[in-house]
Image (spheres, rainbow, N blue to C red):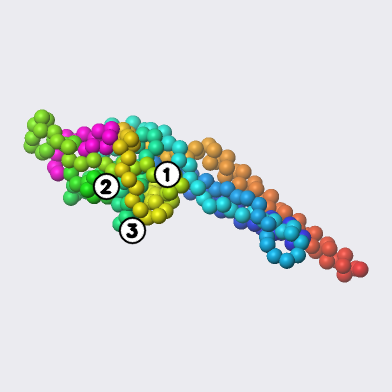
Amino acid sequence: MDRLIYTAMSGARESMRAQSVVSHNIANLGTNGYRALQHSMQSHQTPGDGLQSRVNAQGLPTTWDDSQGPAMQTGRELDIAVQGKGWLTVQGPDGNEAYTRAGSLRLTPEGLLETPGGQLVLGNGGPISLPPFEKLEIGGDGTISIVPQGQEVSTIAEVDRFKLVNPPKESLHQVGSSLFQTISGDAAEADPNVKIANGQLEASNVNAAAALVDMIEISRSYEMQIRAMHTAEEASQVAAQLMRLG
């Protein structure tokens, strides 16, 4: 019966991990630019002496869905959404470059652009700093132009440009709900082909209906594994009784 317990126990463990991943996705349905996490598992033969009959469930590394989330029109001048593949570059918690698609930006009292999570947005030469302005314009290529405070519209001037990048998916790992960094720790090169739209935000790419269905299926799978463990325990007790009778 130990073979059944191995299979059921490991299956229940991976079901709990999968449920944690789906719960995290559901909790981030309203997080701009969030990328849904994906959990998967495979059968794995337990090594060691004896019969090669112990097979358990082994979780694979958690991946994430890189499909684009739906666009939401806001009309706000500091809201931007990356179009297609690509990322906005920010300063990560460790001081190194990080990448996000959460484009609901705001100005600090010092005139620095930052994300809702408080990460400074990076441009050509570091954190983007804007002087007081009458009007702000953000181009599709990431250029930032302003009309300085007290000046005429004709004096509009380019002050900086967002650093937009598009590193391969396999070179990134998640360090926050909507924050990624390169696995190597190296900074990604700016990609002039990445475009953004102003006055829009990208919503989470989590499919709410699919996530709820996954949650139900995982819960049922967990219950089945627990019942299998109870069955193994009962069979073991019956076998022990028969041996005592013998």
| Gap in angstroms between the C-alphas marked 1 and 3 | 22 Å
The outermost residue toward the right is: 246
Give the secondary structure at mark 2.
strand
**Marks 1,2: beta carbons within 8 A:** no
Residue 228 horizontal/vertical position (percent)? 72, 54
Q: Quick check: 153 above or below 5?
A: above
Q: Residue at x 10, y 38 (%)?
A: 149
- Magenta run includes residue 140: yes
x and y percent of residue 96 in the render? 32, 55
Mark 3 or mark 2: which comes first in sequence?
3
Whichever of labels 1 and 2 marks the residue nearer the N terminus, that label is 2
Determine the residue positioned at 21% across, 38% down: 144
Identify the amino acid type marked 1: Pro
The local crowd at label 3, few if under 14, some if 14 to 19, many if 20 or more residues have their Cα within 10 Å, is: few
Image location of residue 88, percent across then percent down: 32, 43
The picture quadrant where one finds residue 49 is bottom right
Instruction: Look at mark 1 in the image and give the residue it sits on.
Output: 168
- The CA span between labels 1 and 2 is 20 Å
Reading the image, the residue beneath label 3 is: 94
The nearer-to-camera label among 1 and 2 is 1
Residue 120 horizontal/vertical position (percent): 27, 50
Q: Which residues are magenta?
A: 131-144
- Residue at mark 2: 122
Q: Is residue 241 above or below residue 124?
A: below
